[in-house]
Image: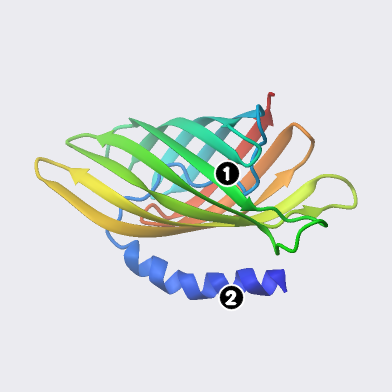
Amino acid sequence: MKRTFFATLLILLLPAVSGYAVDAVGSSFGTLTTAQALGLGHADFGFGIGLADRTSFVGTFAYGLSQYTDGRIRIGLVDPDHGDTEFTIGADFKWQFWNYGVQTDHLFDFAVGGFAEYVDFSGWSVFQVGGHLIGSYPIILTKGGILSPYGRFNARLEHVSNGDSESNLKIGLNAGVAWEATATISFLGEFQIDGNDGVFFGVDFNVM
């Protein structure tokens, strides 16, 4: 039932996302997180790479602000085609309001949040801010670890400055899987459709 729900949602969203992603700049970071919050006082360091329309490398730091809320800072380098490698920075947060488990009737983990991202290319810059919905479903593996398929839908305002300024509403979709190999290491992989289309891979290390 849960897999059918995710598959149906993906089929319904793909045409809309593909249309709105035309001429969008898109995220240089990807999602690289599930809906599950870190928990109060817990922290992760992470690293990621994006093999998309723009190649990107990113480092992240995430911290649990409460039991069901966490925030994340992301700093990276992005290499557009026919351009110089540039610096990019972003931040996001999420609040997990559904928690899948034996003591709840929720079908999956579900979170809502917001994000912002800035990059300055040669001669033009992009600032985007928006909100996102993240859903994931944890599967406990018999040989240890947890496998969590996840997806994110976002709607954002992209403000492009290149002498003139222009702001447009864009949407995007990410879908991937996270593998919590141990209590301290997780691996993630996903695809993104938002204007910077491609695949993203990451690893997170729990340090607190």
Identify the secondary structure beneath mark 2.
helix
Foreground residue, 81 or 56?
56
What residue lies at 36% left-to-right and 39% top-to-bottom?
117
State left or right for residue 80 relative to residue 39. Answer: left
Q: Nearer the viewer, mark 2 or mark 1?
A: 2
Where residue 150 appears, as percent x and y from the top left, is: 62, 56
Q: Residues within 10 Å of mark 2 (few under 14, many from 20)?
A: few
Residue type at the position of mark 2: Thr
Give the spatial CA distance, label 2 vs label 1: 25 Å
Residue 18: x percent and y percent? 39, 67
* SS at badge 1: strand
Q: Residue at x 36, y 56 (%)?
A: 195
Residue at 32%, 58% in the rendered image: 170
Q: Is residue 44 above or below residue 19?
A: above
- Tag 1: residue type? Phe
Seen from the viewer's position, the closer of residues 140 and 104 is: 104
Q: Is residue 82 visible?
A: no
User: What is the number of the mark on residue 201?
Assistant: 1
Determine the residue located farthest toward the left in the rendered image.
163
Q: Earlier in the sequence, mark 2 or mark 1?
A: 2
Q: In this figure, which residue is indicated by the disc labeled 2?
A: 8
Looking at the image, can residue 4 be seen?
A: yes
Residue 86 in the image: state x and y as whole percent: 32, 31
Relative to 32, 79 lies left or right: left
- Where on the picture, by quarter, is residue 193? bottom left
- The vertical placement of 108 against 115, above or below, is below
Quadrant where the C terminus is found in the figure: top right
Residue situated in front as seen by the camera: 78 or 163: 163
How many marks overall? 2
Task: Assess whether mark 1 and mark 2 are in contact (beta carbons under 8 angstroms).
Answer: no
